[in-house]
C-alpha cells in the first residue's frame, strides 16, 4: 500500500493506481513521516503569488550565477599570473 497526498487529503492506494494519482496531482508520501517520496507529475495549480516568488528567486539566482562565473574567471587569471611569475617553483601548490 502507498500513501498519496494532495493539499490536505491523504489516501491509501494500491501500487497499480500510483500512475493515475501522480498525473492527477497527488504526491507519493511516506506513511509515517509524511515526507514526499515522489512528486506529482501533473495536476498542480500554483497561485500567482507563488509564480511571482519563483520568478523573483530565479532572477536572483541567475544574477548570483553570473557573479560567480566572473569570480571564477578572475581567480583563474590570478592562478595563471602566479604560475607565470613563479619561475623558481616556490609557490605553494594545493
Image: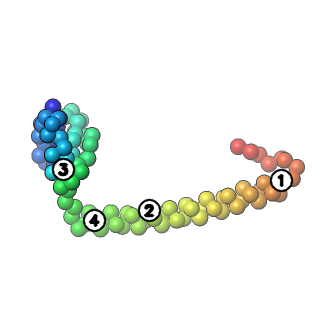
Name which residue lies at 27% across and 40% down. Answer: 37
In whole angstroms, how far apart are the C-alphas of marks 3 and 2?
Answer: 30 Å
In whole angstroms, how far apart are the C-alphas of marks 3 and 1?
Answer: 61 Å
Viewer-nearest residue: 46 or 8: 46
Q: Secondary structure at mark 2?
A: helix
| Residue linked to disc 2 | 61
In whole angstroms, how far apart are the C-alphas of marks 3 and 4?
Answer: 21 Å
Circle 3 or circle 2, nearest the eye: 3
Q: Earlier in the sequence, mark 2 or mark 4?
A: 4
| Residue linked to disc 1 | 86
| Residue linked to disc 4 | 51
| The quadrant where residue 38 appears | top left
Name which residue lies at 20% across and 56% down. Answer: 44
| Mark 3 surroundings: few (<14), some (14-19) or many (≥20) residues within 10 A | some
Q: Secondary structure at mark 4?
A: helix
Q: Earlier in the sequence, mark 3 or mark 1?
A: 3
Name which residue lies at 84% across and 47% down. Answer: 89
In whole angstroms, how far apart are the C-alphas of marks 1 and 4?
Answer: 52 Å
Q: Please say if 7 is above or below 13.
A: below
Circle 3 or circle 4, nearest the eye: 3
Q: Please say if 37 is above or below 83.
A: above
Viewer-nearest residue: 90 or 24: 24
| Residue linked to disc 3 | 23
In this rendering, position of residue 18 left or right of residue 82? left
Name which residue lies at 15% across and 36% down. Answer: 16
Q: Are marks 2 and 1 in contact (CB under 8 Å)?
A: no
Q: Secondary structure at mark 1?
A: loop
| Mark 4 surroundings: few (<14), some (14-19) or many (≥20) residues within 10 A | few
Residue 91 placement (x, y as % from top left): 80, 48
- In what quadrant of the picture does the C terminus appear? top right
Residue 77 placement (x, y as % from top left): 70, 61
Amino acid at each position: 500500500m502507498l500513501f498519496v497526498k494532495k493539499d490536505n487529503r491523504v489516501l491509501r492506494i494500491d501500487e497499480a493506481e500510483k500512475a493515475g494519482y501522480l498525473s492527477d496531482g497527488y504526491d507519493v508520501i511516506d506513511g509515517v513521516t509524511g515526507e514526499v517520496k515522489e512528486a506529482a507529475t501533473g495536476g498542480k495549480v500554483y497561485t500567482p503569488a507563488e509564480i511571482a516568488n519563483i520568478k523573483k528567486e530565479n532572477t536572483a539566482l541567475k544574477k548570483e550565477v553570473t557573479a560567480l562565473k566572473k569570480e571564477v574567471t578572475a581567480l583563474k587569471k590570478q592562478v595563471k599570473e602566479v604560475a607565470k611569475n613563479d619561475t623558481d617553483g616556490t609557490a605553494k601548490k594545493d
